[in-house]
Image: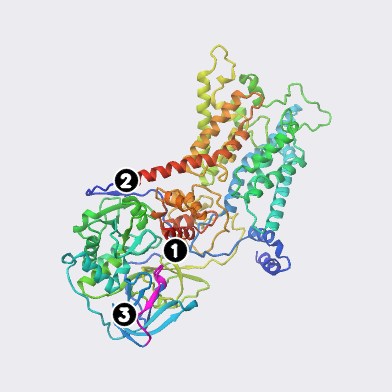
Amino acid sequence: MVKHYGKLVYTMSRTITIKRGYDIKLKGAAEKTISASNASSIVAIKPTDFRFVKPKLHVSPGESIKAGECLFHDKNRPKLRFTSPVSGEIAEIKLGPKRKIEEIRILVDKAQTHYKPFQKSNPADLSRESITEQLIESGCWNYIRQRPYNLIAEPEDTPKAIFVSCFDSAPLAPDLNFIINQEKENFESGLQVLQILANDNLHIGIKAVSNGNTETSTPASFEKYIHHIKGPHPAGNIGIQIHHISPIQKGEVVWHVHPQDVIIIGRLFTEGRYRADRIVVLTGEEVSKPRYVKAITGQLISDLLGGEMDANTIRIIQGNVLFGTTSSSRDFLSFYTNQITAIPEGHEPEFLGWLLPGFNKLSLSRTFFSWLSPNKDYSLNTNMHGEERAFVMSGQYDKVLPMDILPVFLLKAILAKDVEKMEALGIYEVSEEDFALCEFVCTSKIDVQQIIAEGLDLIREEG
Amino acid sequence: MKILRNLIDKVKPNFVKGGKLERWYPAFEAMETFMFSPGEVTGHKVHVRDAVDLKRTMITVVIALIPTLLFGIWNTGYQHYLAYGMEMTHMDYFLFGLEKVLPIIIVSYAVGLGVEFIFAVVKGHPISEGYLVTGMLIPLVLPVTIPLWMVGLAAIFCTLIGKEIFGGTGMNFMNPALLARAFLFFAFPAFMSGEIWTDLSPESGQAIIDAYSGATNLVIYDANYQNMQSIADMFWGFEQGSIGETSVFACLIGAFILILTGVGSWKIMVSVFIGAAAMGLFFNGIAPANDPTHYLHTPFYYHWLMGGFAFGAVYMATDPVTAAHTEKGKLVYGLLIGGLIVIIRAFNPAYPEAVMMVILLMNVHAPLIDHIVVQNHIKKRLRRATQQ
């Protein structure tokens, strides 16, 4: 085992073993088949998918638009352009309270998609500047996100490194190797783009399998960037991999891109167009046939699921059960969503729930008898299983956070708004999703991710 | 169940905001959530939650206390009839003990929960589950002869001064049950030390036998440790002492439950035992060779068996709120508790039972231990940053 603190040494087999963490085993894993989704007549782009972006519209209802043409730019960072994933006619700009732009709805061309042409080229022949320009122009830049703060990368910055995690360890997560294998060439040219943007500081995390034959779809030419990562969730989280490979200090930025988005970036250069279709995995016990579907950003969720679901009894989540956002059948597929999970809501009070043996209750503590059957798949609903209390138990978070961080002390520094202490305890290295399991296990039912988000917002304003 | 649920739903509107009994909502809410785990659903980010909550955690500790309670009840009767030289059945021992111990438990829970309810209603915060455990711990660390009004007073003291003035469970810095005991110890020393450990209620036609002595093993230890009861007696708990503390075996069953369920910290328990053993061995090394009855010669494992050591290590030192919160800190905290107990037992003959005071002392110092651990962590992080 190589501990990746300090300077990196490139060796052929770099294995990082994550010991702390937990795999929540849920019912409703997807079968490895890819089916087409129902075509949506309306596609919507939601500016709210992008944190801290204030949209300035470039289009108005009635105008026709091609895939890859600009819908709006960001008032805070005017360079950032957000483009249409489809061609068609702008149907409606949906405004929310205070005239906030919530959705830009586009009536999709039925016959065929018209793409705005971009330069087709081998990324290796291009300079970093021209690559950046093409990415920004096409809207593909928005797939590149930065840590700290988990927002769209700043094109002016030179990142310390770029990370791609080629496996997702979250509950019921898609098999990213399976997805990458559908478009290997585009994935490779996408990686080439990142390699240039990163000035060669590229890190690719793949799952280490115990028998030594790592299942990987990463091209051989990228072997030297690969890290083998072993262990339970959150081993696949980009934040955990950054922490173990190249931890972020104050003033540094690290970029990261999801493998599906690497493919889309690759297409921009191999096909010369912004083709934004992706594979979304439908999971959870409320999904009648959990499977992979081909989808396009902004598609109606019910078209993906093949029907409406009752919002009172079923929770539809864009993402996984740990750090996804609550959605509904009438909602549209968000920009960064690769997974949809549907689980039952848990409104039913339970008689003497705290006293029963609980053979079907999942808990990391062994206070329920379910620990006697460790390999069972659980049917979990959204019930809180208790009420919020002050911090009582200690050491719980440490068991599921594989980082050199003292979680409770960091949270208390955030609650006290003590910026100096937050920095000393490593706020720059964390993101909400890395603390999702802490929130899951918390006996006192504290909204851990919410507190981390507040801390990051605070430090961003102060910094 | 349905009937009960309907009843609760029917009266609920009176207690919610705007209802005529709105003030009493915390009390109502406590009763409601006691009967039914709430149907509240996840809101922010995580959509599923671990099934454990504070109620379940606390009830697990209470379950872990049951072996000491049952043995304590039996032992109360056993010690009573032993003093009269009477051979009785186990059932007789148990029933006698039950008659004496049950009122103490009832008073402890009734008074303590009463104070919690009043506070919750006045301050409008939910009732925390901490007292489920405290209410059971208080009777177990008191002598069976304690007057009931003192139990009530101790329950009020520990709830008010030990918890509520700091903001309730989770905010207190000293173990409430030990605080209750310390309060009685200093306020009413005559009822907390001396020959008070066995209930000597008169038995018609029987007189206390001559061989009876009210001295506990800790008192004997001061004079000559070799005169203490056998190791087996002290391990199984056939000795005088506070109701729940005597049986090391029962405490170990509790420790097993706490460690297995993950509710109690094994790090603290083990390090308390190791701390005491290390200090005991050290004293053996410096003990005067020409005086074989000198108390420094006491074998280290005697300290594990004497007095409330095991009970303190398993149930008191592990209180997650008042112990050290960092994983490294827990080891230091436990080692210091174990070591200090042996030091005080050895060098303070006037006060041989050190467990209570040492744990309270270390409760006060736990934040300091954590502070040092956190500072070291920060320094290590800085080093890592500058090395790059």
Mark 3 is surrounded, within 10 Å at the Cα level, by few (under 14), some (14 to 19) or many (20 or more) other residues, namely: many
Magenta segment, which residues? A48-61
Q: Mark number for residue B331? A: none
Q: Amino acid at mark 2?
A: Lys
Which chain is disc 3 placed on? Answer: A
| Residue A45 figure quarter | bottom left
Sequence-wise, the earlier of marks 2 and 3 is 2
Do discs 1 and 3 belong to a common subunit? yes
Residue B233, percent across and down? 62, 28
Outermost residue to the right: B205
| Residue B227 figure quarter | top right
Q: Mark number for residue A86? A: 3
Give the mark toward the camera: 2 or 1.
2
| Residue A240 figure quarter | bottom left
State left or right for residue A388 relative to residue A296: right
Considering the numbered disc 3 on the image, is that residue within a helix, a strand or a loop?
loop
Instruction: Please name the residue shown 61% across and 37% down the image.
Output: B360
Considering the numbered disc 1 on the image, is that residue within a helix, a strand or a loop?
loop
Q: Is residue B290 above or below residue A42?
A: above
Q: Amino acid at mark 1?
A: Val
Q: How is the image coloured?
A: rainbow
Q: Main secondary structure of the magenta part?
A: loop
Q: Amino acid at mark 3?
A: Val
Quarter of the image that includes the N terminus of chain A:
top left
Q: Mark number for residue A321? A: 1
Outermost residue to the front: A462
Residue at image mark 2:
A3
